[in-house]
Amino acid sequence: MIDPLTPHDYLTRILNARVYDVAIESNLDLARALSQRLHNKVLLKREDQQPVFSFKLRGAYNKMAHLSPEDLQRGVICASAGNHAQGVAMSAHKLGTRAVIVMPTTTPEVKIDAVRALGGEVVLHGDSYSDAYDHAAALQRDQGLTFVHPFDDPDVIAGQGTVAMEILRQVQKLGTQRLDAVFVAIGGGGLISGVANYIKAVRPDVKVIGVQMNDSDAMMQSVAAGKRITLPDVGLFSDGTAVKLVGEETFRIARGLVDEFMTVDTDAVCAAIKDVFVDTRSIVEPAGALAVAAIKQYVASHKTRGETYAAILCGANMNFDRLRFVAERAEVGEEREALLAVTIPEARGSFRRFCEVIGELPGGPRNVTEFNYRISDAARAHVFVGIATHGRGESAKLAKSFARHGFEALDLTHDELAKEHLRHLVGGHSALAQDERLLRFVFPERPGALLKFLSLMQPSWNISLFHYRNQGADYGRILVGLQVPASDAQAFEAFLATLGYPYVEETLNPAYRLFLQSGHGGN
């Protein structure tokens, strides 16, 4: 049995890594506005500026540059739907070798075109990364190709570790020795494994903090359990870190060397994308903003001042159409907007009084960012309203303030159903929607996804509500109301299991009861 590589072994590999034939030494920029706001110095490692807009080509090229001439002549293969695919394709072009890139059929055309433009041979197979990976493994065996893993390979890890080597060198050039922590996004764990090995070998006093999405935290769960955990589903907003199972080697390294793990949510990441834009006028992808979101969360929880943090902006392959979703959620993520459901009497003068109360809220007059209303009951009306806030934690205070003025208010600022769908659907009570069950689904964004849903459901179940907004992503978020008699409950559970789409049932959500559910218009 081969002994595991030590941090010193990885240090040697990182110092001898071959990455600069294709990669640049990316800038380490001071985020001036964010630093001033947080009262700590925030440094941005600009891996979004690499030729393929991601750090991934470092590890891919280092792996391929260490192959024998015979292996290079046969060619390489990988499975990827994103940044790793582009890194392998560019590296293969530089080294003059063949690169086969297996991508799921759900991969957006923009990513397929980018890989082909770099000379990669694209093979589309399966609906998921797992399907593509299995097919790539079969092609590797059949054609004698070398598999270039996206994260679980010592040469790939060493290539990614050059990011940390640059950070420590660049911090000195900025005229400061101080660096308190480096924040690193985690998908499969290749980047943080390289960063942690280098930093702990050279500057063990610097903390290495891993960051994951709260719905894609395979590494965090695995470290807590002491073994690798396979997630049944992962959130796809941060598709660059949506990994169900981390690598064996990356798990071993992260468990031993990473100081702390954190999770952030979608709203916090959207707010961080905006923060990066304000300081750099550049737009990073969700995975690229995880580290910045974590720094903000870390400062808020630890109340630090005067420290220095580095955030690795690991990628910028953002679909343009997703920006509308990011912009919409950034205000909530920064808690610059509160979303409230306010109940007012359906009587003359009450609407005017409601508007007056908005002007009397604590902290002075507020901008109304959204207002949705539809008459639904002779006695009371439910209003969905967005109100500008001055900082974190104000939404609950605003709800209490409305209550003090005689208006019952429900704080929906952190309610996913309200933010995703209800703000576009307010005013939908219907006496016809009996036995309605409400579910949020994540559908793959491809032809046939809805047909599969419709073909599996029983003909006796009626669709009573359907809401969908394309967000320019690889998946769609769907809100569906289905009229399912209580006697069909067991059959309905079997239908959901067979369908296999991630879902959350929202039938008992209080926001649904206020705005949509049959029989609750005035109750």
Image: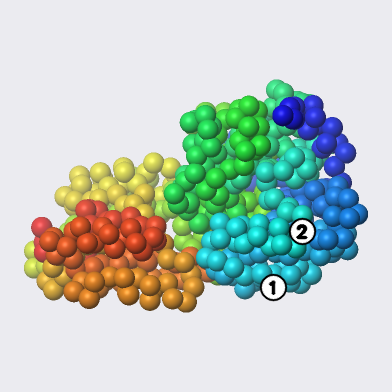
Query: Looking at the image, is mark 2 or mark 1 earlier in the sequence?
Result: 1
Number of marks present in the image shown: 2
Name the amino acid, label 1. Asp
The residue where tag 1 is placed is 113
On screen, residue 400 versus residue 344, left or right, reads right
Residue farthest along the left direction in this orientation: 378
Give the percent coordinates (x, y) of residue 7.
75, 28
393, 18: nearer the viewer: 18
At 63% from the left and 32% from the top, the residue drawn is 252
Query: Which residue is most to the top?
Result: 205
Is residue 438 in sight in this rendering?
A: yes
166 or 68: nearer the viewer: 68
Residue 442 lies, in percent from the top left, at 41, 62
**Label 2 is placed on what type of residue?**
Leu
- Front residue of 309/124: it is 124
Helix, strand or loop at label 1? It is helix
- Image quarter where the C terminus lies is bottom left
Callout 2: SS = loop
Q: Position of residue 34 (x, y in %)?
A: 61, 44
* Residue drawn where x is 89% and y is 55% of the image: 70
Reply above or below: 101 against 257.
Answer: below
Residue identified by numbered label 2: 145
User: Residue pushed farthest front?
Assistant: 142
Please provide percent x and percent y for residue 401: 26, 45
* Image quadrant containing the N terminus: top right
Please give left or right for residue 212 compared with residue 147 in the image.
Answer: left
- Camera-nearest label, 2 or 1: 2
Residue at image position (79%, 26%) is 8
